[in-house]
Image (tube, helix red, strand yellow):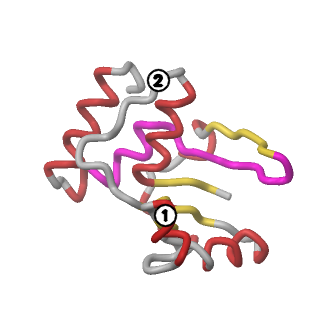
Amino acid sequence: MTLIGSAGLLWHIARIGRDDPLPENSMDADPVTESEAVAELAYDCLIGSEFERRHGWHVNLMPGMVLDHLPPGWRDRACSETYGMLTLVVPAPADLLAPKLRRNEPRDRQHEQLARHLGLI
């Protein structure tokens, strides 16, 4: 599974031993997966689900084509970690921020500032 967006940035923040929240934190995780089993779990956690009501966030399962919006070579810079039977791939912080900075919303610029402050980029 590939994790993109704000959840990917939070993963990198946790990886350096920090728990800083993102400014104007989004309330979703954006995974891309080829696994039907993982996708089925994600479907149970979509917006409006019981999972969201219970935990306060939801899963926004993304199509594989969103990875085309990441900079070329992102796979070579990505990190991966295995949790049980799930291997998670997370693009590098600069690659995660590239589509956000093209969108250029205030919260996306704040995410970049935080990533710089923490030394992620």
Under circle 1, the secondary element is helix
Residue projecting furthest to the left: 106
Residue 27 on image: x %, y %: 38, 59
Q: Which mark is residue 18?
A: 2
Give percent across and percent down for residue 73: 55, 45
Q: Quadrant of the C terminus?
A: top left
- At a point 53% along the width and 21% down the height, the residue shown is 17
Magenta includes 97? Answer: yes
x and y, in percent, of residue 106 in the image: 14, 49
- Disc 2 residue crowd, few under 14, some 14–19, many 20+, Cα 10 Å: few
What's the mark number on residue 68? 1
The residue lying toward the viewer, choosing from 116 and 73, is 116
Give the alpha-carbon distance from disc 2 to disc 1, as whole Å: 29 Å
Is 30 left or right of 85, judged from the image as shown?
left
State the extent of the magenta-drawn residues as a range. 84-100
* Magenta stretch contains residue 25: no
Q: Element under label 2? A: loop
Q: Amino acid at mark 2?
A: Arg
Depth order, front residue of 34/41 = 41
Residue type, label 1: Asp
